[in-house]
């Protein structure tokens, strides 16, 4: 028999360890794992607050793609995303002069918050595609660490520059037209260009959403997989945001006017409360299923 006092001490140690774990910033726990969980594929939570079970690796090179910055170990995604990237990179090689795509960050092996950078990319359902046309698909690993993408936006941030080509439009169109794609984030001048120059059916432009940055890469987000019951669909939808149209409207202008003006801070008013950045979530703020994803051996 263990004396009751000792039992209580043991219990309190176990309890404290559990609590400490739950209160740890999730990014350090997810960022330390180099393999996916051995569970069936499942995305838990939202794009900026969740994790991924049963992640699949995007092979570092394939017939129509190369993964860049392999040292980051962010070439993991939900199998739906991996399939999409393989298929659509093939379409890019077929329909444009690019030989495929250069892929930036997808997710960590088990998704979750990252030590640095992105707010989203936590479910294995987001992927960054470089604006640099993928012409050479034989880049060495070392070269893929040092090479940079290209900026397609002018210095004053109001238009595209000479790096932007109709091939970029074709690549974006291939991604936007895929039914599993929820939305694509790109710098506003690129969307403005496409709204102005696209002829024929413009419906696909609805999924192209203007966003901060995204002038060196565009960001593809796919919908929640049907069998990921706890994956949260992003709201508002692109239909809502573009009032059922293409989003080629007055809201675009804001990005190249007001959004570029310096922010005026009124010292009389209280500082607005800073929202926690998604990379700073504690373990117990993520969906509870993420604990089992993290602990899966
Ligand atoms: Zn991204």
Image (cartoon, rainbow, N blue to C red):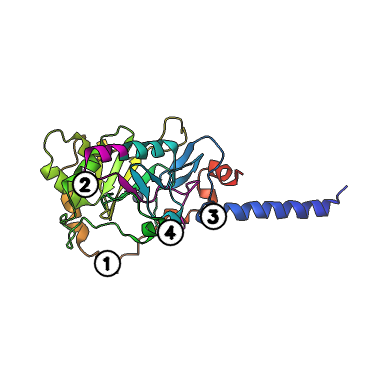
What residue is shown with label 1? 266
Badge 1 density bin: few <14, some 14–19, many ≥20, Cα 10 Å: few
For residue 279, above or below residue 47? below
Task: Select label 4 or label 1 by which is in front.
Answer: 4
The earlier-in-sequence mark between 3 and 4 is 3
Residue 207 lies, in percent from the top left, at 25, 39
Q: Residue at x 21, y 57 (%)?
A: 259
Q: Determine the CA span between mark 3 and mark 4.
A: 13 Å
Q: CA distance from mark 3 to mark 2?
A: 35 Å
| Residue ID for mark 3 | 32
Residue at numbered disc 4? 116
Q: How many marks?
A: 4
Nearest to N terminus: mark 2 or mark 4: 4
Q: Main secondary structure of the magenta part?
A: loop
Of residue 21 and residue 215, the one placed in the foreground of this image is 215
Can residue 242 be seen at all in this image of the molecule?
Answer: no
Marks 3/1: CA–CA distance? 42 Å
């Amino acid at each position: 028999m263990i004396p009751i006092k000792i039992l209580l001490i043991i219990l309190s140690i176990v309890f404290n360890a559990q609590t400490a774990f739950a209160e740890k910033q999730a990014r350090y726990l997810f960022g330390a794992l180099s393999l996916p969980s051995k569970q069936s594929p499942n995305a838990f939570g939202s794009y900026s607050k969740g994790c991924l079970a049963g992640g699949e690796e995007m092979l570092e090179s394939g017939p129509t793609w190369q993964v860049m910055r392999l040292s980051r170990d962010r070439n993991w995604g939900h199998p739906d995303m991996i399939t999409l990237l393989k298929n659509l990179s093939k379409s890019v090689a077929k329909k444009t002069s690019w030989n495929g795509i250069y892929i930036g960050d997808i997710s960590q092996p088990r998704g979750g918050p990252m030590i640095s950078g992105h707010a989203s990319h936590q479910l294995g359902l987001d992927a960054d595609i470089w604006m640099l046309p993928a012409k050479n698909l034989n880049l060495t690993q070392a070269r893929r660490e040092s090479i940079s993408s290209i900026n397609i936006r002018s210095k004053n941030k109001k238009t595209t520059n000479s790096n932007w080509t109709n091939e970029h439009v074709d690549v974006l169109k291939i991604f936007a037209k895929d039914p599993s794609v929820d939305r694509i984030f790109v710098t506003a001048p690129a969307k403005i260009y496409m709204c102005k120059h696209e002829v024929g059916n413009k419906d696909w432009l609805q999924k192209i959403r203007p966003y901060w940055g995204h002038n060196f890469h565009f960001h593809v987000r796919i919908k929640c997989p049907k069998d990921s019951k706890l994956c949260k669909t992003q709201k508002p939808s692109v239909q809502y945001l573009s009032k059922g149209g293409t989003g080629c409207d007055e809201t675009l202008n804001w990005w190249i006017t007001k959004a570029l003006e310096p922010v005026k801070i009124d010292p009389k008013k209280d500082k607005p409360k800073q929202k926690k950045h998604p990379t700073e979530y504690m373990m117990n703020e993520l969906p509870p299923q993420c604990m089992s994803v993290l602990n899966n051996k």
